Amino acid sequence: MDFYVTMILLFFGCSFNSCSQFPLREYHYVNKLMSWSEAQHYCREKYTDLATIESMDDISRLKPDFSYSWAWIGLRDDPKSWKESMGNDTNSWRWSATGQTSKTGYHNWNVGQPNSYMANANCVVMNTNGKWYDTGCNSLRSFVCYDVTDQTEKTYVFISDEKTWNDAQAYCREHYTDLPMIENIVENNEVYSAASAEVWIGLYRVPWTWSDNTQSSFTFWKEKSPENYGGNQFCTVESNLHEWNDLICLEKFPFICHQVLKLKTTVKMKIQTDADITDPATNAQ
C-alpha cells in the first residue's frame, strides 16, 4: 500500500539566524583583584574562560556599566609567542610565502628586538647589518623579492622602490614568487648580499589572541590604544564604557568571565499518512 510521511521539525531555543551565532556567552563580573593570569585561572575553574568578546552583540550583553574603571578580558598578546623566538602560536611570526610559522626556528633579531613598539610593529625589516627588527607595516622601505628556479634554487632581487610591507608583498607576488622566507643563516646571508639598503623581508604576525583560542578580528580599542606604553603592556582590560586598553598583565583588576551556553533543541515530529497503520505490514514498514 502506498503512503506518504511528512515530518515537521520545530526547533525551540533559537532561530536559524541566532543558531548560526552559537556559542552564545553569558558574562559574569567578578569583583576580585587579580592579575590577568590569576583571573584566567579563576574563570577556567568557575566558568568557561576569561571573557571573549567578538561582536557588538556580545558587547550589548555586557552590563551597561560597573563601579570600577577597568576589568580584565581574555585578550592577550603573549610575548612568549613572539619575543626573541619563532613560536607556533596564533600570534607568532609567520612567513608571507607560506602563511605558516617557522619550520626551523631560525631568527636573526637585533639586540632588543622585536619589541612591538607602540603595539604596532607587526612586520619585519632586515637592517644594513643583516639583523632583523620589527616595525609598522605601513612605513616605507625598499625590499627584496625571491624567485625559485630549477624547482629548488632561490634567486634574490633587490627592489629600490620604497613601499609598505603589503604593497611590497603584492609586487613580489606579481613579478616573482614572494618576499623572502629565511630559515637558516645561508638564506639570511643571501638576502643580505642582495640588499643595498634596509629591506622588508617576508616576516609578519597578527597580534592579540583570545584565552579560549577563539579566532576573531573584532576589536573595540579606545582611542590611541593599544600603545604598549613602556614596552610591557600585553593584556587587555575593558572600561566601564566597554572600550579596551592594554595594560601590564601583573597589575590587579576585577575581571569578566564568560560561560558558554549549551544549545538545547526540542524536536517535535508530526506524521501524516493515508495508510492503515493498524495493518501489521504497514506498521512494520
Image (cartoon, rainbow, N blue to C red):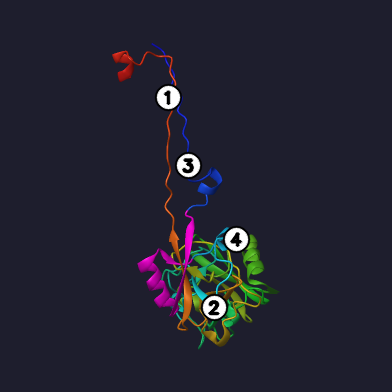
Tell me how far mark 4 sits from mark 1, CA to CA: 42 Å
User: Height in image: 5 above or below 250?
Assistant: above
Q: Name the element at disc 3.
A: loop
N-terminal label among 4 and 3 = 3
Question: Where is residue 127 shown, x and y percent of the image?
Answer: 58, 83
Task: Write the start and end of the magenta stretch as one range.
Answer: 23-51
Mark linked to residue 271 = 1
The answer to whether the residues at label 2 and label 4 have Cβ atoms under 8 Å apart is no
Question: Where is residue 141 shown, x and y percent of the image?
Answer: 66, 77
N-terminal label among 2 and 4 = 4
| Kind of residue at badge 3 | Phe
Q: Is residue 230 magenta?
A: no
The answer to whether the residues at label 4 and label 1 have Cβ atoms under 8 Å apart is no
Q: Is residue 121 left or right of residue 209?
A: right
Residue found at the far right of this picture: 161
Question: Where is residue 118 shown, x and y percent of the image?
Answer: 60, 81
Tell me how far mark 2 sits from mark 1, CA to CA: 57 Å
| Kind of residue at badge 4 | Met
Q: Dot 3, how many residues are within 10 Å of its Cα: few (below 14), some (14-19), or many (20+)? A: few
Residue behind mark 3: 12
| Kind of residue at badge 1 | Ile
